[in-house]
Structure formats: C-alpha cells, structure tokens
Image: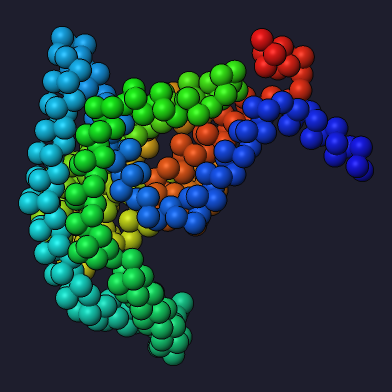
Amino acid sequence: MKQILNKWLGRYFGNEEAVLLAVMLASFMILIATVGEFLGPVFAALVIAFLLQGVVNALIRVGSSQRTSVITAFILFLVALVTILVGLVPIVGRQMTLLLSEAPNMLGRLQVFLAGLPERYEDYVTAEQFQMIWVRVSEEIANIAEQVLSFSLSSFPSLFAIAIYLLLVPVLVFFMLNDREKLVRFVTNLLPNKRPVMSSIWSEMNVQFANYVRGKAIEILIVGLLSYASFLFMGLNYAALLALLVGLSVLIPYIGATVVTLPVLLVGYMQWGSSPEFFWLFMVYGAIQFFDGNVLVPLLFSEVVNLHPVAIIVAVLLFGGIWGFWGVFFAIPLATLVKAVFNAWPDGSPSDVEVVED
C-alpha cells in the first residue's frame, strides 16, 4: 500500500510546480472559506473590471489612448451605477414593500381557492382531507416565511456595509483598469519562472472567465428587460420586482428559473385567476425561458461552458454552500478552473518532464 501511495505521489507531485499549484489551490479554498465574505468588494470590483475591460479594448481598437479609454469606461460605469441607485432601487423597494403588505391577503385568497377544491373534486378530496392539507401547508408556509425573514434580516447589509461597497468598489475598479498590467506583472513575479502548467491554466481561464462574466451580464440585462417589457405590457403587478428576479435567476443555472417561476405565476394567478390573461402570462414566461435556454445561452456561452449539467448543479451547490452569493456567481468559472487544472496537471509522463526541465 505504501509503495502504491509513493508511486501515485511521485507521478502527480513529482515536480515543484505541481506542489506549488496544489498549495496555491488549497490556500485559495481556505481563504475563501474563512474570510471570503470580507473580500466581497474586491470580487465585485473584479467582476466589473472584467466587464469594463471589454469596453476599454473596444475604444483602443478605434484609436483611443489607454488612459482615455479607461476614463471613458469608468465614467460609463459611474453613470450606470447612479442610474441603478436612483431609478431601479426605489421602484423595486416600493414594489417589494407592497408585495409584503399584500402577502396575507394573497394567502387568504389562496385558502379560499383551496377550500373550494372539495366541492369541485369531491371524488378525489374530502373536506377533512383538505383541512389536514391546509394545516400542513400553513405550517410549512409559516416556517418558510420565518426562515426567509430571519435570513433576510441577518444577511441584509447594513448601511455601513453599503457605504463601504459604494466607496471601495469604484476605487478598486478604476485601479484594476488603469494598473491592470502592473497588477498582473506583480502576481506573475511571485511565481516560478518555469510554469508551463500554470501558464496553460491561465491562458484558458483568462479568456473563459472574461467571456463568462460579460456573457452573464448581457444575459441578465436581456432577460430582465425582456421580462419587464412583457410584464409591463400585460399589466402584471410588481413588474419591476418580478423582472429583476427573473433576470437574476440566470445566475443559478437550471435551479434559478425553477424557483422564480413560483412567485411569477402566483402573483399572476392572484391578480387574474383562471382567466386568459393568466394563461397568456404562463405562455409568455415560458417563451422567455425558452429564448434564454435555447438562444441566448448557446449564443453567449457556446465556447465558455463545456460542462455537464450535473457538474454545473454540483458546482452551484458546493461553491454556493462554501461562499454564498459569490460562490453561486462564480460556480461555473470555478468548475471550469477545476476541469482546466485536471486537464493540465502533470502526470509524470515524459512529455511533462521534458516541459518542466526545459
């Protein structure tokens, strides 16, 4: 057994780069699990910087200087940030308050609807069975509401935390854009001169991560705006809030759309009942999800996401459990990183030895 273990260690950890890479990955996971929540502004700035770097590159290609391109992209970011804070946040906050105030009335109407089921389907459910079902449902709703409320109160950022984000993120974004080459050079100087495995992983992940972040931002924007326009045209209540939820649901592949379907259809049913408008809402929402899954995702991520759906779901659950929101957001890039590491990891073959020794 000892001989087998030594042979395995010699094969996969037989050179210094493999050992260093293992130590770096382990340190990164420990760092994320312990102080990841305190690094939220850094990761938020990193995501925004990747988004804006595409704007900077586009401006440079049309003849603008590096400095001018960075300043222009940064000004566009500030304008978008102010627009969200002044325009979107008040509307969504107001609609969320209205929805919470209407929640007891909606539950009462739901109870009335369920109470009529024994009369409509007396061959399938009796009044006593309905009463038992409603008691269980009421208990579960109360438990879920209590958990959601406690989670919201505990996780909702304080005014101080919001102020920290609003102050630090723009500053970090500017310096990440303006001093990008210096920051990259500082990190690479800490690594060994001969690093073929790390170079292979970096060249793959740099392109894929940037494309994923930009593609996901475009997907959120398109799905959110399309949902808002559709809900507003149909006259659905809480259109901005529900459209925001639908747009953000694309952050969690396969799971997000399923979870957000319930509030959209519940609000529609409470507003219209079993009317043609409700069925039109069902059709329109289904069309938006079909468009997202079969048009947007293949168009935006065809060369980025090459993972099995099971691997994506496991990555969302694993990294989300470790790292919360940022784990969910970075689940696919992190899963892609794991795959890239396994593909590039030296296995002690002659080709790997030659590359390392050159």
Q: Quadrant of residue 61?
A: top left
- The x and y percentages for residue 351 are 72, 13
Which image quarter: residue 176?
top left
**Taking 247 as reference, is 338 above or below it?**
above
Q: Position of residue 30 (x, y in %)?
A: 54, 51
Residue, x 92% and y 43% (percent of image)? 1
Residue 24's place in the image compared with 91, above or below, is above
In depth, the one of 251 and 8 nearer the eye is 8
- Quadrant, the C terminus: top right
The quadrant in which residue 81 appears is top left
Visual colour scheme: rainbow
- Residue 248 vs 208, above or below: the answer is below
Residue drawn where x is 13% and y is 47% of the image: 84
Q: Identify the residue at the far bottom of this view.
A: 128
Closest to the observer, 21 or 269: 21
Q: Residue at x 34, y 50 (%)?
A: 40
- Is 298 left, or right, of 346 in this rendering? left
Q: How many marks?
A: 0
Point out residue 127 in the picture as x, y percentages from the top left corner: 40, 88
Give the residue at x 40% y 79%: 143
